[in-house]
Amino acid sequence: MIKFAWDGYRKYAWGENELRPNSRSGHSSSIFGYGKTGATIIDAIDTLFIVGLKEEYKEARDWISEFNFKDLAKGDLSVFETNIRFTGGLLSAYALTGDKMFLTKAEDVATLLLPAFETPSGIPYSLIDLQTGRVKTYSWASGKAILSEYGSIQLEFDYLSNLTGNPIFAQKSNKIRDVLTAMEKPEGLYPIYISMDNPPRWGQHLFSMGAMADSWYEYLLKQWIATGKTDQRTKREYEEAIFAMEKRMLYKSEQSNLWYFAKLNGNRVEHSFEHLACFCGGMVVLHAMNEENATIAQHYMDLGKNIGHTCHESYARSTTGIGPESFQFTSSIEAKTERRQDSYYILRPEVVETWFYLWRATKDEKYRQWAWDHVQNLEKYAKGNAGYSGIRNVYDSNPEQDDVQQSFLFAELFKYLYLIFSDDDVLPLDQWVFNTEAHPFRIRH
């Protein structure tokens, strides 16, 4: 499966960001600008190494050794996506192999992002053009930065400073943390938008466990774990945030007793749950596995199982056995969507990610069965001419494919599927922590 997807990319889109498997051509989404920066190669290399595809790993390494990000990158790049995919992918390749070339390249990429942090408060701009040096926020964000983006820098930047001895990266990420620590949180919650002035102000009171918020919470927990549990501030802020979200945003559906985190817009509750937000089941299980207080640990283990079950229901209740981008809870439907614009699947990993943590924590065979069901459904509905594509409607018995093989298919979905069927000594969770693109970093002890 992994080899088939890689071979298609290598044959038809080598050096491009992604593959169009049915058109057999290259593809690039706007997050990468319009240069050919080989996102799939950098996102995939740690997975190729972990699964033992030695020839493929060597091809990827050879390409990366010649890779010059500044020369290849064109147009506006997402600072967040460049950090988690490129810096993160190169850091994990170094962590796994000890090959210094990867660390040098990771530092090169991160250094190129630094101008985005030259702002009054230290909250970085969302987009950077490496050729012109121009930085900006998204045109649709009204001049504001987004929580999941500026809040998901720390794991990579702190690790990079730790490995290289260059403090600038940790300084930049710590400054963001200091700004957020000092800000008043409405009911303990973090709004999605923040202004770029100093001191910054929150934007409208939108709260979510999904898009535009998700990895901020994930990185609070994981930064505590990554530092060998020495960064107590992140642990405290993580616990405070999750407690506030449980209090205001956690619901159980009436018909099927399915637990989910709703979205909040001020005081208005939107009873929907995104595929992206399904990661949080794994997050709270990881908390439970690292929590000394047995009562708290059991509480979060139970919550993780419940979220894992809810997200499985979103898969089980679709025609293809694959879950939609977002699903609703109303008086008439639960864990399904009637919105055509929410019924697609783009090879997202978050549901399988949660099952991975649940498998490691419980060894309940159902999580392996659910993962295997997903493998078979991917083969049936997502496999195309030269790789795997997303599908446009999970409720269609013969769904149309979107003809995009996302780079995170390799970084995340394939990796988590492989790890569910591997022994625990492959990337043990007391020695490794995964960034939000599933790139493993060594825990500092």
Image: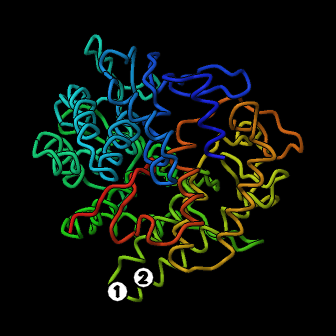
How far from the left and from the top, in percent, is residue 75? 40, 14
Q: Residue at x 14, y 44 (%)?
A: 164
Distance between the alpha carbons at the discs numbered 1 and 2: 6 Å
Q: Residue at x 62, y 34 (%)?
A: 7
Estimate how packed mark 1 is, as few (under 14), some (14 to 19) or many (20 or more) residues with alpha carbons within 10 Å: few
How far from the left and from the top, in percent, is residue 243? 40, 70
Image quadrant in which you'd find residue 432: bottom left
Instruction: Please name the residue that numbered disc 1 is placed on.
Output: 293
| Residue type, label 1 | Asn
The colour style of the image is rainbow
Image quadrant in which you'd find residue 333: bottom right
347 to the left or right of 135: right
Hey, which residue is sitting farthest top in the picture? Answer: 132
**Frontmost residue, 122 versus 323:** 323
How far from the left and from the top, in percent, is residue 221? 34, 63
Hey, which residue is sitting farthest front in the picture? Answer: 55
Estimate how packed mark 2 is, as few (under 14), some (14 to 19) or many (20 or more) residues with alpha carbons within 10 Å: some
Instruction: Please name the residue that numbered disc 2 is placed on.
Output: 297
Hey, which residue is sitting farthest right in the picture? Answer: 397
User: Which quadrant is the C terminus positioned in?
Assistant: bottom left
Q: Is residue 214 above or below residue 357?
A: above
Q: Residue at x 55, y 65 (%)?
A: 356
**Frontmost residue, 180 versus 109:** 109
| Residue type, label 2 | Ala
Q: Is residue 201 above or below residue 139?
A: below
Question: What secondary structure is marked by label 2?
Answer: helix
Kindly indicate whether the residue at mark 2 contacts the one at mark 1 (C-beta within 8 angstroms). Answer: yes
How far from the left and from the top, in percent, is residue 166? 10, 42
Q: Is residue 429 above or below residue 57?
A: below
- On residue 6, the disc is none
